[in-house]
Image (spheres, helix red, strand yellow):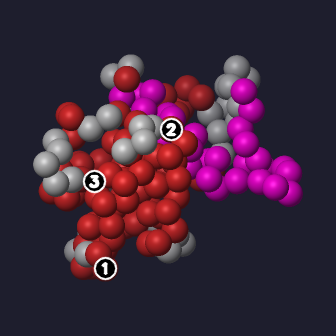
Amino acid sequence: MSAPTSRRGGSPSRRALRRRAVEMLYEAAQRSLDPVTLLADRVGSIEVDPVGDYTISLVEGVTKHRERIDELLAEHAQGWTLDRMPPVDLAVLRVGVYELLWSADVPDPVAIDEAVGLAKELSTDDSPRFVNGVLGRIGNIADRLRAVL
């Protein structure tokens, strides 16, 4: 299966690269693997589609900051523990929080909208509202959080 491309053709769109990062984080969690190790196995492999630079930076960034990301998710996912969250939603949320707080080139509303879009594509009917709520709460304090990172 090839990665979706931008409308102009050529390289994958940023949304497709984001989706690939979510899929890798999900797969690593399901297989109890380190995401960066899984990523390293895929980069350069002729058996899978090429892994884009943005996918690499997301997987590496989420992995590097996972402890802080998970603390924020646990704090702001009202009534939900990380263990109770659907694994796809957790992967989407981790990418969303990473983009909100550590991707300076991604505006906060775009990070949230993209995560909600991925939840619509990949998860349950309730997931987009859940993802929007959690990321919205974190987005409301993102400037303060970035100041202390």
**CB within 8 Å, label 2 to label 1:** no
In the image, the segment drawn in magenta is: 1-29
Q: Residue at x 68, y 25 (%)?
A: 48
- 83 left or right of 89? left
**Disc 1 residue type (three-letter):** Asp
Query: Where residue 122 sits in the image (x, y, percent)?
Result: 50, 38
Q: Residue at x 37, y 59 (%)?
A: 132
The residue carrying pointer 3 sits among few (fewer than 14), some (14 to 19) or many (20 or more) residues within 10 Å by Cα, namely: many
**Disc 2 residue type (three-letter):** Leu
**CB within 8 Å, label 2 to label 3:** no
Query: Where residue 52 sits in the image (x, y, percent)?
Result: 66, 46
Tag 3's secondary structure? helix
Residue 15 can be seen in this image: yes
- 16 left or right of 132? right
Q: Which residue is mark 1?
A: 143
Residue 36 can be seen in this image: no
Cα–Cα gap, marks 2 and 3 = 21 Å
Q: Is residue 12 covered in magenta?
A: yes
Q: Which residue is mark 3?
A: 69
**Disc 3 residue type (three-letter):** Ile
Which callout, 2 or 3, points at the residue further toward the start of the chain?
A: 3
Q: Which residue is mark 2?
A: 122
The residue carrying pointer 1 sits among few (fewer than 14), some (14 to 19) or many (20 or more) residues within 10 Å by Cα, namely: few
- Mark nearest the camera among 2 and 3 is 2
Which callout, 1 or 3, points at the residue further toward the start of the chain?
A: 3
Instruction: Give whichever of 100, 132 is nearer the camera.
Output: 132
Q: Is residue 10 covered in magenta?
A: yes
